[in-house]
Image (cartoon, helix red, strand yellow):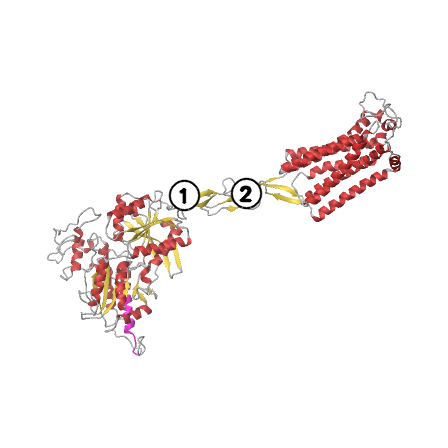
């Protein structure tokens, strides 16, 4: 706490000096005078008690620091010498020994005096100097205090800022040790655990300078920080408040240090538009019995030599005391904002002595908020308890060497009293336990105070919370948010940030050259989200999820596969079933006309196997539709490969016989081979081919089978359910064997295509193989260039096209003759032994009739 009073405490004898404030206004400091009276009242209470210092009387001297460092140093030296001289070689005055010093009011003043008093190890107890610098016992070995250190208050302010989520805060400090070290501790604490940044940090000059003050006003006006922390005494902060009022600055929330949070100088109704809703930390409040009556017990007529009482009376009632040593009224000397010159004049009204103190309404008689005053009272008792411990020392068991002797209460050195005050400073006062630690600090709770307007138009200090710092590491922060008055247009908690919050779906990005609290809002990338305000990073969605358009939620990815209910899937299934029905219809025709020459030609059983394999391949297309599963992935490719291998091996069995028939035209050896061939050999070719394919498929399924795969590689927003084909080598070998069979079928059929029969099956097989090759050659690039369900559709189309091609080229011509040209379905005509008698029918292949050579070879092989 910052105040302009330095109090001296002696033992046994009392000396008094006036207490006035002589800075800027040079008006009487009623609050400081109340502190003086509280000290005197505490001394009287100590002197009345029998349990503390019995038969010993405490006295006092009062020195006025005038709130200046030079006056503080001068008074410290004068106190040590006992003379007006300031050379502390020895004490010239007689009387009671010096005991201790209570004060000074300001941290800077206490620092100045303590540096001198510490040289002599002279005890000093502060009641309002809270600078954390005074906790350094190396620099200030004899300083103790009854007010908490600013380190605790700064921690509480940081907790307050973090509690309300303020990230952009300005600071204003008095240009002294109290303000500078207080703001320094606050900055360190507020920036340690949370990304709170300091928007600006300005100082208030100790000597009035309107130009500097207006510079601070301009910064406050231009900043976008709505929360400002002020570490300053009320008399230092007051000129800045006057300028802020003139500039009509509103909408700011002020965080007050204990130095001005309950100051009557600041708590004026005209300041409420600016300072209303301020939140600050007030030191522990106490009740002092009998203080109000003691304050009222003052009159200049009791002691004509009491200049302090006379000046108080003149200032309080704005009159001049007759024949007083103080011939003017200090309150009439004005220099409020620096616009007026100081003018000295005496009041024309003389004091009558009949004025009523009860009618006064000033800080002196205000005992509703006894905070610093209460600390003054405790400081006096701290010295009294230290002296009492010194008095109770028993000879022979004392703490001093040599001889374990004790100091005498009527004659002791300051360092001897300091021993007891440093090591045994625990005592009770007004039902409160006071414990001053080895650093000279106490840990007492702070009241969190909010400025609110009461019903009478005045300002009330409403307690809205508690901050109890019990040690350097443990603290308890409690606040009732609902009871706080906010001085904002909406009367809601203000927001203080460098820029607007980043909404969900965005993350904070660093702005180069600016504090961490200033950032850009960057939209989350695809597949990432942020579902909170001011997110530092975006979170990636899980594998099966993707970000929605606002990027604030992960949603299930769209699943893609060729479903049964899709129009494309239904169409392909319909085509597959239709093809199977057509093949079955062909089978029915073959069964009905199984005894005819065209059906029996070139192994009837192989024809049935081909039809069965075509049904298998056509229906295999259904396995490609629907959501892929491990079993369907394995079944589809293996079934397709086996179906084609059965079909192609049967076709190969047929074309081999045709190939040998072609060779028999010009080779007797080939003729003998052809004649020795039986239908069983054709079936052996089929069996060997199918068994080879079965072996390849079995190895494929055992060693590296296909499996279902959720593919997210190509489309991040979709999950493509497809089959991972496993070993590409096995897949190529499996279908490569089918290709090998197809090539053999094509070559053998191509060679035998010109056999002189009326119905040459080799020609139609050749066309069928060409269709097969064209389809699958076209399939490969189409398959590789498509993704998702269309990739499966391309493969199904290739299966259907190749199956329909084989069906159409191999069986449709035969069914045409069987059903529509039954007269041509004879062994003679089919074998080429007789000419066709159906002149209206178009010739089938390049039939040889009368134009063929005389050695016509029949290709009709009975089953």
User: Which quarter shows the C terminus?
Assistant: top right
Residue at mark 1 to residue at mark 2: CA–CA distance: 27 Å
Marked residue nearer the N-terminal end (1 or 2) = 1
Residue 459 placement (x, y as % from top left): 28, 49
Left or right of 148, for residue 41 = left
How crowded is the residue under tag 2: few (<14 C-alpha within 10 Å), some, or many (20+)? many
The answer to whether any part of residue 583 appears in the image is yes
Residue 737 placement (x, y as % from top left): 74, 41
Q: Quick one: which residue is furthest to the left in this view? A: 323
Q: Is residue 630 magenta?
A: no
User: Which quarter shows the N terminus?
Assistant: bottom left
Q: What stretch of residues is rendered in magenta?
A: 382-395
Q: Secondary structure at mark 1?
A: loop
Residue at 84 percent across and 35 percent down: it is 660
Residue named by callout 1: 500
Q: Is residue 388 magenta?
A: yes
The answer to whether any part of residue 34 appears in the image is no
Residue at 79 percent across and 28 percent down: it is 813
State the predominant SS element of the stretch in magenta: helix
Residue 254 placement (x, y as % from top left): 32, 49
Please state which of residues 129 and 841 is positioned toward the viewer in this rendering.
841
Q: Is residue 139 above or below residue 369?
A: below
Residue named by callout 2: 546
Please state which of residues 581 and 385 is positioned toward the viewer in this rendering.
581
Which quadrant holds residue 819? top right
Q: Is residue 657 above or below residue 178?
A: above
Q: Secondary structure at mark 2?
A: strand
């Amino acid at each position: 706490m910052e105040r302009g009073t330095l109090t001296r405490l002696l033992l046994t004898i009392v000396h008094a000096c006036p207490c006035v404030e002589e800075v800027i206004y040079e008006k009487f400091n009623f609050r400081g005078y109340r502190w003086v009276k509280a000290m005197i009242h505490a001394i009287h209470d100590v002197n009345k008690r029998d349990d503390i210092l019995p038969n010993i009387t405490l006295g006092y001297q009062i020195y006025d620091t005038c709130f200046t460092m030079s006056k503080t140093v001068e008074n410290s030296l004068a106190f040590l010498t006992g003379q007006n001289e300031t050379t502390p070689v020895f004490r010239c005055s007689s009387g009671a020994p010096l005991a201790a010093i209570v004060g000074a009011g300001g941290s800077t003043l206490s620092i100045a005096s303590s540096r001198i008093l510490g040289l002599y190890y002279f005890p000093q107890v502060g009641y309002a100097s809270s600078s954390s610098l005074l906790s350094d016992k190396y620099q200030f070995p004899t300083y103790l205090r009854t007010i908490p250190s600013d380190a605790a208050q700064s921690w509480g302010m940081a907790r307050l800022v973090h509690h309300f989520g303020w990230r952009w805060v300005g600071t204003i400090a008095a240009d002294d040790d109290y303000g500078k070290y207080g703001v320094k501790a606050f900055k360190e604490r507020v920036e340690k655990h949370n990304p709170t940044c300091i928007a600006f940090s300005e100082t208030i000059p100790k000597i009035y300078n309107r130009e500097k003050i207006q510079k601070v006003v301009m910064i406050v006006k231009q900043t976008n920080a709505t929360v400002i922390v002020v570490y300053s005494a009320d008399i230092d902060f007051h000129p800045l408040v006057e300028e802020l009022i003139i500039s009509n600055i509103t909408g700011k929330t002020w965080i007050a240090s204990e130095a001005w949070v309950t100051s009557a100088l600041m708590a004026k109704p005209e300041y409420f538009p600016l300072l209303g809703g301020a939140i600050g930390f007030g030191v522990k409040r106490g009740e002092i019995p009998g203080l109000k009556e003691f304050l009222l017990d003052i009159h200049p007529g009791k002691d004509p030599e009491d200049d302090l009482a006379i000046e108080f009376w003149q200032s309080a009632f704005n009159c001049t005391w007759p024949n007083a040593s103080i011939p003017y009224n200090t309150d009439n000397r004005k220099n409020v904002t620096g616009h007026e010159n100081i003018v000295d004049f005496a009041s024309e009204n003389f004091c009558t002595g009949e004025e009523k103190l009860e009618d006064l309404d000033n800080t002196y008689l205000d005992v509703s908020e006894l905070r610093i005053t209460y600390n003054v009272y405790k400081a006096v008792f701290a010295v009294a308890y230290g002296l009492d411990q010194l008095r109770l020392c028993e000879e022979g068991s004392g703490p001093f060497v040599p001889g374990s002797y004790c100091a005498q209460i009527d004659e002791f050195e300051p360092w001897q009293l300091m021993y007891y005050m440093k090591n045994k400073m625990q005592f009770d006062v007004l039902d409160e336990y006071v414990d001053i630690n080895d650093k000279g600090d106490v840990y007492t709770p702070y009241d969190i105070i909010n400025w609110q307007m009461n019903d009478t138009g005045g300002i009330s200090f409403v307690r809205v919370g508690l901050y109890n710092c019990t040690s350097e590491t443990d603290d308890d922060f409690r606040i009732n948010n609902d009871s706080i008055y906010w001085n904002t247009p909406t009367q809601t908690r203000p927001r203080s940030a460098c820029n607007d919050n980043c909404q969900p779906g965005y993350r904070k990005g660093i702005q180069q050259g600016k504090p961490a609290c200033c950032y850009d809002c960057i939209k989350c990338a695809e597949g990432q989200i942020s579902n909170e305000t001011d997110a530092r990073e975006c979170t990636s969605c899980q594998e099966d999820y993707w970000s929605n358009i606002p990027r604030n939620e992960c949603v299930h990815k769209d699943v893609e596969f060729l479903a049964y209910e899709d129009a494309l899937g239904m169409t392909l299934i319909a085509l597959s079933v239709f093809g199977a029905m057509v093949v079955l219809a062909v089978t029915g025709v073959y069964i009905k006309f199984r005894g005819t020459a065209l059906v029996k030609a070139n192994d009837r059983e192989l024809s049935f196997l081909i039809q069965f394999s075509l049904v298998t391949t056509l229906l295999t297309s259904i396995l490609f539709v629907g959501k892929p599963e491990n079993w369907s992935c394995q079944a589809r490719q293996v079934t397709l490969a086996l179906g084609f291998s059965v079909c192609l091996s049967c076709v190969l069995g047929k074309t081999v016989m045709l190939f040998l028939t072609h060779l028999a035209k010009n080779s007797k050896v080939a003729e003998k081979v052809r004649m020795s061939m039986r239908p069983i050999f054709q079936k052996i070719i089929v069996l060997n081919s199918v068994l080879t394919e079965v072996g390849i498929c079995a190895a494929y399924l055992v060693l590296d089978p296909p499996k279902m795969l959720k593919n997210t590689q190509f489309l991040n927003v979709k999950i493509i359910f497809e089959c991972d084909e496993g070993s590409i080598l096995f897949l190529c070998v499996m279908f490569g064997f089918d290709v090998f069979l197809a090539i053999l079928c094509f070559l053998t059929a191509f060679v035998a295509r010109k056999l002189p029969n009326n119905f040459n099956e080799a020609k139609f097989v050749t066309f069928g193989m060409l269709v097969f090759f064209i389809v699958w050659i076209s399939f490969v690039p189409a398959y590789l260039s498509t993704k998702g369900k269309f990739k499966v559709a391309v493969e199904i189309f290739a299966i259907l096209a190749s199956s329909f091609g084989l069906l159409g080229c191999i069986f449709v011509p035969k069914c045409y003759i069987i059903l529509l040209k039954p007269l041509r379905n004879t062994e003679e005509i089919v074998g080429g032994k007789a000419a066709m008698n159906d002149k209206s029918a178009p010739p089938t292949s390049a039939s040889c009739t009368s134009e063929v050579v005389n050695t016509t070879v029949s290709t009709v092989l009975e089953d």
